[in-house]
Image (tube, rainbow, N blue to C red):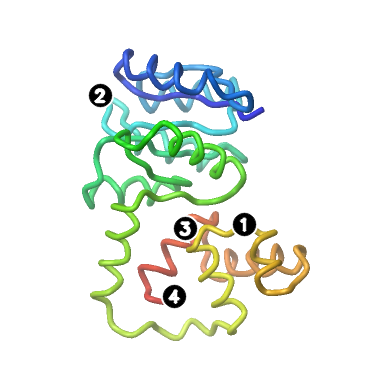
Amino acid sequence: MIKVLIADDIAIIRAGIKAVLSGCDDIQVIGEASDGKEAFEMSVRMRPDVVLMDMRMPDFDGSYGTHQIKEKLDGIKVLVLTTFDDKETVNSALAGGADGYILKEMDSSQIINSIRAVSGGINVFCDNVFRSIKKETALKPSPKNYDLTPREVDFLRLICDGYDNRQIASELYLAEGTVRNGISRLLEKFNLKDRTQLAVFALKNNIV
């Protein structure tokens, strides 16, 4: 069962999301928060698997909540669910460590599948956000030499494509443990915390 916490300052939106998720046998809404601070405090107490985080909320916004959760709580995924896809808001969410970024305009089935994917360790970005990141990287010069092996580049490429460790292992004909160790070394090499930051780093630096 995937335990979900909904963070949004508009009660009717929280109710609507909860109603959509109530029809899923594998998803349970365990709480609702009205801002980023409350989302963090409830996450400390309730330990959800996924926090659905709106970005623009009064007092303590989604950036605050995302940063606090990802910085201080292990194992909790933050999936941004918002109406805004401007560069500043997206960058703020990614800088805070968000595991995915989707829009409220998406179909209910897409939101549900995004929750499942993020819970399983797959980073999810809506098309607008992914295109924005790709467009930004297209303006960059040739990639720097980060002393990466061809296999490490393959790891980064597949992470950017949303593959989990099992899928990467299958694609590259490797043991899953080899993939896990290789990704851990990449995180250590670049001093990053998670796969989302690896994906953003690889795209923004034109590595893949």
Q: How crowded is mark 2: few (under 14 residues within 10 Å), some or many (20 or more)?
A: few
Picture disc at residue 58: 2
Q: Is mark 4 on a helix, strand or loop?
A: loop
Q: Which of marks 3 and 4 is nearer the N terminus?
A: 3
- Residue under circle 1? 164
Q: Is mark 1 on a helix, strand or loop?
A: loop
Q: Give neighbour class at mark 4: few <14, some 14-19, many 20+ (Cα, 10 Å).
A: some
Pointer 3 or 1: first along the chain: 1
- Asked if disc 1 and disc 4 are in contact, CB closer than 8 Å, the reply is no
Residue that appears at 54% across and 77% down: 153
Q: Residue at 48% across / 81% down in the picture?
A: 146
**Residue 8 spot, x, y in % from top left:** 35, 23
Q: Do the residues labelled 3 and 1 touch (CB within 8 Å)?
A: no
According to the picture, the residue beneath numbered tag 4 turns out to be 208
Amino acid carrying mark 2 in the image: Pro
Residue 1: where, in percent of width, then height?
67, 27
Work out whether residue 104 or residue 33 is closer to the camera in this orientation and state it: 104
Of mark 2 and mark 4, the one earlier in the sequence is 2
Q: How crowded is mark 3: few (under 14 residues within 10 Å), some or many (20 or more)?
A: many
Q: What is the distance, in whole Å, between disc 2 and disc 1 at their CAs?
A: 35 Å
Please provide percent x and percent y for residue 173. 73, 74
1 or 4: tag closer to the N-terminus: 1
Q: In which quarter of the image is residue 13?
A: top left
Between 8 and 41, the one nearer to me in the picture: 8
Name the residue rendered at 45%, 22% in the picture: 20
* Distance Cα–Cα, label 2 vs label 4: 37 Å
Real-space Cα separation, disc 1 to disc 4, in angstroms: 17 Å
User: Which label was assigned to residue 197?
Assistant: 3
Q: How far apart are marks 3 and 4 (CA)?
A: 14 Å
